[in-house]
Amino acid sequence: MTSEGLSKYCEEDEDLALAYYDDDDDFDTFTDGDVDCSCEDGVLGFSDPFNSEVKPRILLMGLRRSGKSSIQKVVFHKMSPNETLFLESTNKICREDVSNSSFVSFQIWDFPGQIDFFDPTFDYEMIFRGTGALIFVIDSQDDYVEALSRLHLTVTRAYKVNPDINFEVFIHKVDGLSDDHKIEKQRDIHKRANDDLADAGLERIHLSFYLTSIYDHSIFEAFSKVVQKLIPQLPTLENLLNIFISNSGIEKAFLFDVVSKIYIATDSSPVDMQTYELCCDMIDVVIDISCIYGLTGDEAVSPYDKESMAIIHLNNTTVMYLKEVTKFLAMVCFLREESFERKGLIDYNFHCFKKAIEDVFDVRLKVQKSRKLLSQRRWSKQNTLNGAHVQPH
Ligand SMILES: Nc1nc2c(ncn2[C@@H]2O[C@H](COP(=O)(O)OP(=O)(O)OP(=O)(O)O)[C@@H](O)[C@H]2O)c(=O)[nH]1
């Protein structure tokens, strides 16, 4: 193992010493964000010149009652799925800023089903230009012929404006379907949507499909994958996690956004749904216990802080270990009981991992700040020029 592993991801080349795990019991060393959910249930903010530059935009689209608002409320507002039954139909575009951390920082635009966004008075080019991902929600319990033609129309228009958009199709409300039925629906929707694109000579457009429901963890998993594609540092995070687990005797590690339970990265071993669900449950337990027994009544105190950590021993000799990484991120690991005996080593490696993550954050923050400053300067320069036209001396 060499030093390049960690240091190449950090701009400031600080010497990090990461202990690595081997079968002997000794230590070998080598050198080497925030949910700011300010939901603006309001009209579009096209006039804000800095918005699209700083945050990639995620659009939630689909026919009426397909489940768009429910997805947003369940994933980002902790609404219980049953409560969504009472949600009223959205009749205006709802924009929400989600800036969980410097990595997870994006906007969600929830489009009311009945809006005809191809109305000539509606500037869809402006919307698509700044979009990172377009999620199209299809109600799998309903007849989806109309939804498919709408999907085709939306995707082809959006692609013309911005070919870099990631097109994500949520085949939603699959909780009412049997496993066979789910697979069959997915295959059918996949085939029809791609056939329509091929007929239009647009087979280069790539659509990703997910089976989702707000009644289980599938919606969180799908959203995690959508968000991960928008995180430019994802390969860096994955590499850091790979290095961390291989040196600590850990089997699987996730980096979670605590509030939304979106995992923003994991190591390169495959993810199974059960493991992911266990992580979500563990985060819920930690936050709930902390809210009930840990808070002193002072509202300014968060139930999740630097001291937050939890260890759960499962009955199959597996240990789950949760630790705070940043204000809003947590690492959740799975490891065997015998590996957990070397907790000191794991904690030491975790410390190095955390330091590396902070460095990645720092670089991103610096870049964002200087970009914002540059835009502000340009903006005020332009305003001064415009002002000079209005009031010439
Ligand atoms: N069974 C099931 N029902 C769901 C799911 N997601 C949403 N629903 C229900 O679908 C209905 C419509 O949900 P909304 O979120 O209001 O749909 P919408 O797409 O925002 O609708 P508009 O605002 O009219 O565009 C509600 O009664 C939800 O409870 C799901 O995963 N499974």
Image: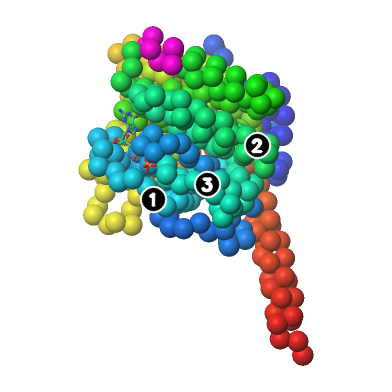
> Quadrant location of the C terminus?
bottom right
Q: Return the residue at label 3.
A: 117
Indicate the quadrant where residue 80 lies.
top left
Judge by depth and name the residue closer to the eye, 89 or 168.
89
Instruction: Name the residue located 46 percent from the left edge and 30 percent from the top edge.
Output: 147
Q: How far is disc 1 from disc 2 in space, using C-alphas?
A: 25 Å
Which residue is tagged 2? Answer: 159
Q: Earlier in the sequence, mark 2 or mark 3?
A: 3
Which kind of residue does numbered mark 3 sit on? Phe
Looking at the rendered structure, the secondary structure element under dot 3 is: loop
23 relative to 380, above or below? above
Magenta region, main secondary structure: helix
Per the image, the residue denoted by label 1 is 91
Q: Are marks 1 and 2 in contact (CB under 8 Å)?
A: no
The earlier-in-sequence mark between 1 and 2 is: 1
Does 280 sit left or right of 118 as displayed? left
Figure check: 101 above or below 315? below
The reply to whether the magenta stretch includes residue 19 is no
Which sits in the foreground, 49 or 300?
Answer: 49
Q: Which residues are magenta?
A: 179-185
Visible residue check, residue 335? no
Q: Residue at x 69, y 31 (%)?
A: 32
